[in-house]
Image: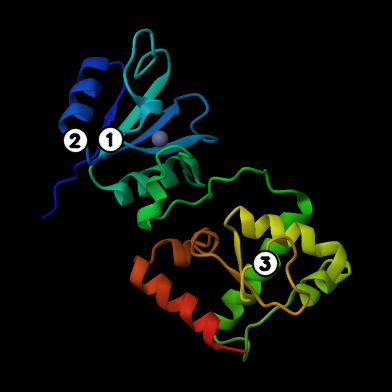
Amino acid sequence: MTVSAMLIIINDDAMYVSWISRHRQGFVVDGTRKSMRKHLMLHRARCSAIKPHKRARLTTAGHIKACSIDAVELVTWAREQTGGGVTACGECHPDQEGYAVDRPQTRHALTRLGTGVLSYVLELAVMYLDGEEPRFGPTVQDIGLSVGKTAGQIAPAIHRLIEDGYLECGAPAAAKAVPNTAIIYPSARSLRTIPAFGEMSPESLDAELKKLRSTQ
Ligand SMILES: [Zn+2]
């Protein structure tokens, strides 16, 4: 039997301060009770953004902290609470260890065009991995066609998605431009936004990504 190590702390700052001081390798999901459906953020317990300081609202005034030494447990909990997921803190990067964080931390919000491009690439990847398509290899040109744009028109949006960690480019890294014939792959993090992949261990997900890269 496994005992859950997760602790949800509401209105008890002393307990929170004690927990993070005793679990420096742990993780904390930070949110407010009212907006929990919209916004939960995963931090490392050591992150300065959730460090107790004078007058900080930690677990009072509607604030809530979920603490665990197991990031996966917190992410699962956050998913249940939001029906969506949890954002990785951009400061302490708790997702760098391969934890299943749903929404990648980005510098840019996804535009409608960006969402369209990402959905198209993810859909193709899932169809291929499910055995519904014999090959995977959308180029910049193919992606443009899918949204009614030329390669030149779609390249900046793809470049931005690559920069933000949603997509990856099969061609050697180019400074500014993505070649029209380059094959575009989903990143591990964007593949994880699909529930079946979100549940996978980092090793299994890696194997799926390798499958995508082996088809041309
Ligand atoms: Zn943080």
| Colouring chosen for the image of the structure | rainbow
Query: Residue 157 location, x and y as percent?
Result: 76, 57
Disc 2, SS: loop
Residue 129: assigned label: none
Residue 67: assigned label: 1
Do the CB atoms of the residues marked 2 and 1 lie less than 8 Å apart?
yes
Q: Nearer the viewer, mark 3 or mark 1?
A: 3
- Does residue 130 show up? no
Q: Determine crowd level at label 3: few under 14, some 14-19, many 20+ residues with C-alpha closer than 10 A.
A: few
Q: Is residue 19 left or right of residue 156?
A: left
Q: What distance separates the C-alpha of mark 3 from that of mark 1?
A: 41 Å
Q: Which residue is mark 3?
A: 174
Q: Which residue is mark 2?
A: 23
Disc 1, SS: strand
Q: Amino acid at mark 3?
A: Ala
Q: Determine crowd level at label 1: few under 14, some 14-19, many 20+ residues with C-alpha closer than 10 A.
A: many
